[in-house]
């Protein structure tokens, strides 16, 4: 990794972690650190993106990502337009490209996009002038989630390099797992994927991760344990006999968590399915930083919007 500190991102878009350099990841995390302060002010608003317009284009359900982006945009004083597939002309058969062309005719500066098809943000990014931010595309990537996860790890543990991060659950259908594997690998952490064979991607080792088919072996000495829900909406049939059996073998219980380091963090991108991938005693326990992830997500999204807008001036001017 170069020691030279970057001041801006190379691309107009954030479509994934894969194209980012380690210095760009560091820049986003450092900028988010500065922006966290705004949430502690009595007036949580700065004029940084005044006069800029952001379209939030969500073609799949979302609670955290959508609200987090909207909060980030409002805190930076951007004008925000929300678009969802239901209630729009997508339900009348309009294509993504036609939808985007019509939105572009209204001259937005950013389009934050969640889409069920892998690669949809990349296609849009090559067609429009606005900055495209990927808020999750199919089973491909969820870059802002991986950035907020890394930010949360760094804030609690002081570093990313050298950490052992266990990611367990439905890895096969998880864009979060993929983005985290790219990011943590670039930043010098070791990633362990843990899943039954039916929920592990083929050739997972090519992502530079350790592959485990027992949760216990993946948990031994881990610094971070990140649990993922089973993405039933992306599977025709369940890839295991029952949810009860899944919990028996892959659920994170207080007893299993004892295998990780005593100070290990418990993380989850949400939404949680309690009693399936994680016991409530762990999700709500003292090592859980799940709600910190949500808080940190706003600062990460503010940092990305600020940096993609050119990163001019201070990110945190007086309100
Ligand atoms: N973590 C995450 O993407 O959650 P949402 O689906 O609620 O946005």
Image: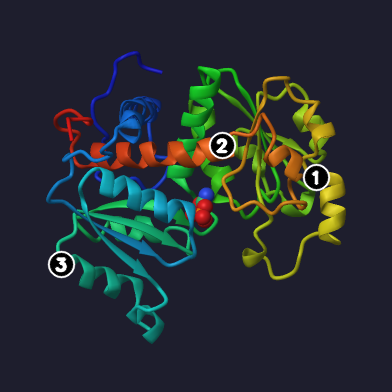
Q: Position of residue 63 (x, y in %)?
A: 48, 57
Residue 106, which numbered label?
A: 3
Q: Position of residue 132 (x, y in %)?
A: 30, 53
The vertical placement of 185 against 263, above or below, is below
Is residue 188 in sight in this rendering? no
Residues under numbered marks 3 and 2 in contact, where contact means CB atoms less than 8 Å apart: no
Question: What kind of element bears circle 3?
Answer: loop
Q: Which residue is mark 2?
A: 181
Between discs 1 and 2, the one toward the N terminus? 2
Question: What kind of element bears circle 2?
Answer: helix
Decide which of 196, 255 is in the foreground and name it: 255
Using residue 299 as the reference point, say whether residue 274 is left or right of it: right
Instruction: Quadrant for the C terminus, please.
Output: top left
Q: Which residue is mark 1?
A: 250
Q: What residue is at 84 percent from the left and 32 percent from the top?
A: 255
Instruction: Quadrant for the N terminus, please.
Output: top left
Q: Nearer the viewer, mark 3 or mark 2?
A: 3
Question: What kind of element bears circle 1?
Answer: helix
């Amino acid at each position: 990794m170069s020691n030279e500190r970057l001041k801006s991102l190379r691309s107009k878009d954030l479509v994934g972690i894969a194209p980012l350099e380690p210095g760009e990841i560091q820049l986003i995390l450092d900028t988010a650190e500065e922006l966290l302060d705004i949430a502690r002010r009595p007036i949580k608003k700065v004029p940084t993106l005044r006069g800029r317009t952001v379209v939030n284009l969500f073609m799949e359900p979302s609670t955290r990502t959508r609200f987090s982006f909207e909060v980030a945009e409002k805190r930076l004083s951007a004008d925000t337009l929300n678009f969802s597939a239901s209630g729009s002309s997508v339900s009348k058969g309009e294509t993504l490209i036609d939808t985007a062309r019509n939105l572009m005719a209204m001259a937005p500066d950013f389009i934050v996009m969640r889409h069920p098809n892998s690669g949809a943000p990349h296609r849009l990014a090559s067609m429009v002038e606005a900055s495209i931010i990927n808020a999750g595309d199919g089973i491909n990537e969820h870059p802002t989630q991986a950035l907020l996860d890394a930010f949360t790890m760094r804030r609690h543990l002081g570093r990313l390099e050298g950490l052992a991060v266990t990611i367990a659950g439905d890895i096969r259908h998880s864009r979060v797992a993929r983005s985290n594997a790219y990011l943590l690998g670039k930043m010098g952490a070791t990633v362990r994927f843990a899943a039954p064979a039916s929920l592990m991607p083929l050739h997972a080792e090519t992502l530079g991760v350790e592959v485990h088919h027992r949760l216990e072996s993946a948990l031994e000495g881990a610094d971070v344990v990140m649990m993922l829900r089973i993405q039933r909406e992306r599977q025709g049939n369940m890839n295991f006999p029952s949810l009860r059996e899944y919990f028996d073998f892959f659920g994170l219980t207080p007893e299993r968590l004892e295998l990780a380091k005593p100070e290990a963090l418990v993380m989850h991108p949400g939404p949680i399915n309690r009693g399936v991938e994680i016991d409530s005693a762990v999700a709500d326990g003292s090592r859980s930083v799940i709600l910190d992830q949500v808080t940190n997500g706003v600062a990460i999204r503010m940092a990305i919007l600020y940096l993609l807008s050119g990163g001019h001036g201070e990110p945190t001017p007086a309100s």
